[in-house]
Image (spheres, rainbow, N blue to C red):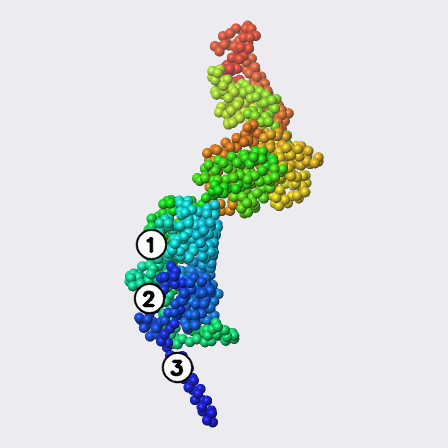
Amino acid sequence: MRYSVVLGLHTLIWVLLTASFYCQKPSVVNIGAIFTFDSVIGRVAKPAMEAAVSDVNADSRILRGAKLRLFLENANCSAFLGSIEAFQVLDKGVVAIIGPQSSAIAHMISEIANGLQVPLISYAATDPTLSALQFPYFLRATQSDDYQMAAMAGLIDYYGWKQVIAVFVDDEYGRNGISALGDELERKMSKIAYKLALPVQFNQSYLTDLLHKSKLLGPRVYVVHIDPDPRLRIFQVAKELQMMTSDYVWFATDWLSTTIDSFSPMNRTSLAVLDGVVALRQHTPQSNRKSAFMSRWKEMQKEGLASSELNVYGLHAYDAVWTVAKSIGRYIDEHENISFSVLDKLLELKPSEIQLRKLKIFDGGPLLREKLLETNMSGLAGEVRFNREDRNIVSGGYDVVNIEKMAIHTVGFWSNYSGFSVSPPVTVKRGTSSYPPLDQKLGYVTWPGGNTVTPRGWVIAVDEQPLRIGVPKRVGFVEFARELNDSHKIEGYCIDVFMAARKLVPYDIPYRFVPFGNGQSNPNYDELVKMVAQNVFDAAVGDIAIVKNRTMIVDFSQPYATTGLVIVAPVSNSKSNAWVFLQPFTWELWSVTAASFVIVAVVMWTLEHRVNDDFRGPPKKQLATMFLFSFSTLFKKNQEDTVSPLGRIVMVVWLFLLMVITSSYTASLTSILTVQQISSPITGIDSLIASNWPIGYQVGSFAYSYLTESLYIPGSRLVPLGSPEEYERALRQGPDNGGVGAVIDELTYIELFLSRQTDFGIIGQTFTRSGWGFAFQKDSPLAVDMSTAILKLSENGELQKIHKKWFCKMGCPGDKDQDTEPNQLHLISFWGLYLLCGAFSVVAFVVFLIRMIYQFVRYKKRQVNHPSPVSTRSSNTQCSQVISNFVDFVDEKEEAIKRMFQHDNPQVQVC
């Protein structure tokens, strides 16, 4: 019984003591800080954190009466030493660790912090991968390089550069930062062309060798992302290598602004080496607290408490201490006490000199982490608030600074919600993160060399390493590109076009032609293009067709020649001339047609002269009217109306004849100008495929892949041909004698081939459309500039002159008429119509003549019985007088004759 009472009493005492311990608020709260003391950032972080601790302890409300104790440990720029120092700090019962400044050390300590549930708040580790879910206890109190590289990519895109060279330190900070830059540039259709990695502890000779080699590369835009370097070694070496001239562009991440902000006024003379450099600086808005702290910093310098000028990381370090302190204060309000417990797995370890078994887990770590994420305050560097997704502080944007004549000028600002602006981010209304590119604006920048004009930012090649240009070493059609007697001297139509375009490019292009091919057969052009894509050649110049599969791996210039696949086969050609319009009719048909116009003119004048005033008048007028009336029926309605019934009958028949003749002439002339009489049954690509005849193609051309892959023609039907002579021989032999039924090749080759041949011609229409261009590596800026130059050559006529120089010595290809002899229209095809028209004309004329003779006889009888003033001649005249009188009678108007007969016998009607 007594034993039970004693046991109960002990239990009660233990419970009361335990409850008292957990309810007791701490009097001192320990936090740790790990960083490199003797560094650009460390020299400002240490006094800034000590000042923050002093300010926190000066206000008892922050920790609810408790004091904040800061344990500082020096990592000495070593991840190994930093890890050891982390264990040293954790052994002192800290509830949070501030730092480290190095991303590499932060990776190591974050794993330790995760295991012991101790929040790690870094004010300088900017590696974006630290925000991974792998490190839930890592919080970043400065801006991540994700934001900085978005700003840098935007800056590069703002000036229109597509390729850059990245210089970086080869650790987690450098590699991951440059990786983020590559991702951002890719979104803007740009890229990092080359990466120059530096060891963490690089020396000047290594740096000199690396930068010197980079001078042979094309891009001239450098992005430097290294640790802060007070000696500015990269720019010192660049200046020695003549790389700080107007041809170069130098960007630096915020390491440079941090470095130069830390310089004392006496050390600002070293800024001379930075003339023209553009850098980013984390934006910190102006505030009264910031101004007061900067004044206080000056006093600390005088007292020897601070040995460096204040930079932005000093502000972040100060804010980090306050962030931890306020979060601890809120934690104490809820939990009241701070407790640790032993990790069971550590107890299982065997005892050793390394007292890992003494390490304890911070029980309140998850809660304190939540309190840190809930932070929302205004610090010296601006707003302090964390994104829960990545545990990064909300980005405050960046200043864009330009160093000119040892002075630092702010030329603009960047934020992830407004882009570039000349106004600070705090004055811009917050909105969506997407912003119109046209609204972006920066101030004037002075570039290296003192140039205010934006540099081109790249060179195609240098004299030490000229552009490697592959040129096909052709065997056939050598007019396009050829090597002269293995002399490495290249000439040809394509070469002249390239040289002319090169003169119009606004910069020098050192180059070297490299023949491609064995000289025994035409090279494979697909392989040539692949070698450009694989960086064996920088470009390819020649008769290179622009086709789909090639455009996927290289960039082409604007086409300088239009072409496409065509079919050539034996044809029977006719020679056209200036008198081609006479070819539709035979000479017999032309003669009969001309005679018909004359006959109809005479007949119509005869029939209309007595009754139609339009056909009367002076002899010259009547002659003109007679022929104009006949020929005008070809084009429009005749101006003179027909009056006599006989004349109208003749006109109807004549107009019908003209309608048939003109329609037939038009159709025949059209056929002559557009149609050929081919000597083979091939009429186009469909009939050629259906014929199963062998088909010739040029060795090395894309025609083979097109015919087999797109038209599904078996490869066994395709016969490789390498020269115009082989074309001619294969076509003349024909499909039955070991030759081919037709050759399929590009139009430009075929035109050149046909300029020397008269027995072959193009069948049908071009069934593919393409062009020839110069091939360049993907995203090569030279492709754009050469395209512009080719367009200028086309506009000023130079391109046509080059074409004439090579292909028009004996007449330009394509100018010679390849049309075949047409079927002429013969008289036998229309003799029925001419006979019908002639018969009607003769009948009408005979009827008219009989009627005139009848009237003339009556007239003569009346003249005998009743002498009339119309004629005073004697009735005993000779035969000639009779004919003359008859003509005069016919020339009289019809109305006059009628009145004469009516006066003589009113009851008699004239027939």
Q: Residue at x 40, y 50 (%)?
A: 236
Residue 167 seen in the current view: yes
Mark 2 or mark 1: whose residue is earlier in sequence: 2
Q: Residue 3 shows which numbered tag?
A: none
Residue 164 seen in the current view: no
What whole-number distance in Å separates the C-alpha atoms at marks 1 and 3? 59 Å
Q: How crowded is mark 2: few (under 14 residues within 10 Å), some or many (20 or more)?
A: some
Residue tagged 1: 267
Which is in the foreground here, disc 1 or disc 3? Answer: 1
Residue tagged 3: 20
Which is in the foreground here, disc 2 or disc 1? Answer: 1
Q: Pick whichever, 468 or 371, lies toward us.
A: 468
For residue 537, above or below residue 17: above
Cβ atoms at labels 2 and 1 below 8 Å apart: no
Cβ atoms at labels 3 and 2 below 8 Å apart: no
Q: How crowded is mark 1: few (under 14 residues within 10 Å), some or many (20 or more)?
A: few
Determine the image quadrant of residue 810: top right
Which is in the foreground here, disc 3 or disc 2? Answer: 2
What whole-number distance in Å separates the C-alpha atoms at marks 2 and 1? 26 Å
In the rendered image, residue 245, in percent from the top left (x then y), is placed at: 40, 45
For residue 94, above or below residue 196: below
Drawn side of residue 79 relative to residue 257, left or right: right
Q: Type of residue at label 3?
A: Ser
Q: Residue at x 39, y 76 (%)?
A: 337
Q: Type of residue at label 1?
A: Asn
